Amino acid sequence: MPETTSYSRLRIDDRGVAWLTLDRPEVHNAFDDALIHELNDHLDRLFEAIERDEVRALVLGSEGKHFSAGADLNWMKRMVDYSFEDNLSDSRELSRLMHRLDTLPCPTLCRVQGAAYGGAVGLAACCDIVVASEAARFCLSEVRIGLSPAVISPYVQRAIGERQLRRYALTAEVIDVSTAQVLGLVHEVTAKDKLDERIDTLIDTLLATSPQASRATKALLADVARERDSDATRERCCQTISELRVSREGQEGLEAFFAKRPPDWKPSNDRNEQDDKQHKEPRS
């Protein structure tokens, strides 16, 4: 299902992997209101496609040398004449983008090949897994021009912690990829020419998991993060595992495990191979 627009594109392949790509390489994939609007439209379509069981995972990436340079300069020039209400409307659209990406029910991968500045750090923080090349770097650059990383701050703080966010949001220092990995913003660092190969490997890993269990686990972990230890959280955890155990996919997964065969959700090219290393007895 290809969708092509001016600044971005969405494609869903025959495995159910969605590829959402920023496509403004001439301005290093900088954000403006048009791109934000497009990305929100794409995410709305993805929510609908996931409900129809058409999407298993999302890869968020971009064309060109850099992931995203942050805010577009022409957009920033227009902002000078914006009223408070105009700015509030713009900010709410960006907030909607971050929230929709963060709450997308399927697993999400972020591919960072170069610089990710400003709001692009928020995009990375909203994804479940971030893989970056050795050339990647990150920066919360807003305070340099009298602004704040306000809209993305909840997601970046969750990724790197309150103490570290205070430093990097207030200094606007450039964060090299090794530091970003130590902070928790990046999960893996790879050579630039190996980036796509690593993304493909992770996609295969995700496609080997139960679609229903992936969605349920992602939703559960969001609830646990909001309230880690309470009667309601513990009950939610018990309800989730019990529902999965009696579900069709849960029953299929257990039956496949004991029969030493791949479950029926695995891609057909994997079903002829048995990987004993991945067959471990469930404990939860």
Image (cartoon, rainbow, N blue to C red):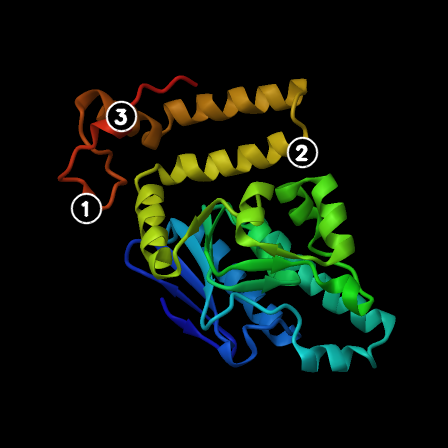
Q: Could you tell which of marks 3 and 1 lies nearer the N-terminus?
A: 1
Foreground tag (3 vs 2): 3
Quick check: 271 above or below 253?
below
Quick check: 104 above or below 42?
above
- The residue wearing badge 1 is 268
Give the number of the disc on residue 106.
none
Gap in angstroms between the C-alphas marked 3 and 2: 31 Å
- Is 109 displayed left or right of 86 in the figure? left
Q: Label 1's element?
A: helix
User: Residue at left 65%, top 76%?
Assistant: 72
The quadrant where residue 18 appears: bottom left
- The residue wearing badge 2 is 226
The amino acid at mark 1 is Ser
User: Residue at left 22%, top 20%?
Assistant: 258
Residue 223 visible in image: yes
- The residue wearing badge 3 is 279
The amino acid at mark 2 is Arg
Q: Are marks 3 and 2 in contact (CB under 8 Å)?
A: no
Q: Label 2's element?
A: helix
User: Residue at left 70%, top 43%?
Assistant: 164
